[in-house]
Amino acid sequence: MRVRYGDIWDDWPTSPVVVPVTIGWKTGGSAVMGAGIAKQAANRYPDLPQWWGFHCQQFRENTPVLFHPKYNMIFFPTKPLDEDRPWVSWRQDSDAKLIWRSAAQLAAFGPVEQTISIPLVGCANGKLSTELVLPILKTFLSHSRFQLVVTPREQPLIEGIINGAWDNWLLTDDPRPTDAGVPAGTHFLKEV
């Protein structure tokens, strides 16, 4: 995986952009895309919440990573469906197990020669730690066609990891319950 600092939209629409999204929908069928990159995408194309909401209703909790060919965007679920109240699914924190599944699906996506720009999914509005998310992304998206785009706000947090390779970090089996959404055997980064 390559790393670039800046705005995720800089390489778009030439290269697809990964849009972290919630699995859920409102009464009218459209998805809530009210924050972060999802909001930026919806502001560019107001029909996206309806498109994403439709697919969330079709696939429900199994909603996969989906490509929108017209807009060259890849929708990457990070927050799971609240089955009883799908319109408030966005209020949850992102789920590491769902990010694991989405990253595995993204790894199998599209032409190998095409660069795909991905943010630190699940870390900002999703409230997951970089130490949890980066190893998941590294596991599945290590190919050079994936470009992690780091914002200036995130740069100090991960600069040591990406510039100093992974040498300043240990993979640890820090005990975390698998019911927290993390597959058993997952390793986490811990600064030494």
Image (spheres, rainbow, N blue to C red):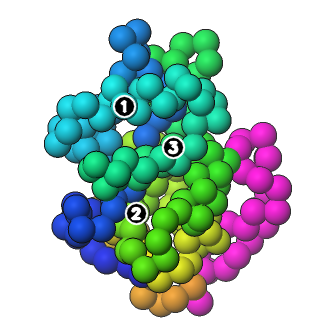
C-alpha distance separating marks 2 and 3? 13 Å
Instruction: Name above or below for residue 47 compared with residue 66.
Output: above
Amino acid beneath label 3: Pro
Q: In the image as oriented, which residue stretches furthest toward the top? A: 27
Q: Is residue 151 visible?
A: no
Residue 118, numbered circle:
2
Amino acid beneath label 2: Ile
| Residues rendered magenta in the picture | 167-192
- Residue linked to disc 3: 77
152 relative position to 116: left or right: left
* Quadrant where the C terminus is found in the figure: bottom right
- Residue pictured at 43% horizontal, 80% vertical: 113
Picture coordinates of residue 137 (x, y %)? 56, 66
**Closest to the observer, 63 or 35:** 63
Whichever of labels 1 and 3 marks the residue nearer the N terminus, that label is 1
6 relative position to 25: left or right: left
Determine whether the residue tagged by mark 1 lies in a helix, strand or loop. helix
Asked if the residue at tag 3 contacts the one at tag 1, i.e. Cβ–Cβ closer than 8 Å, the answer is: no
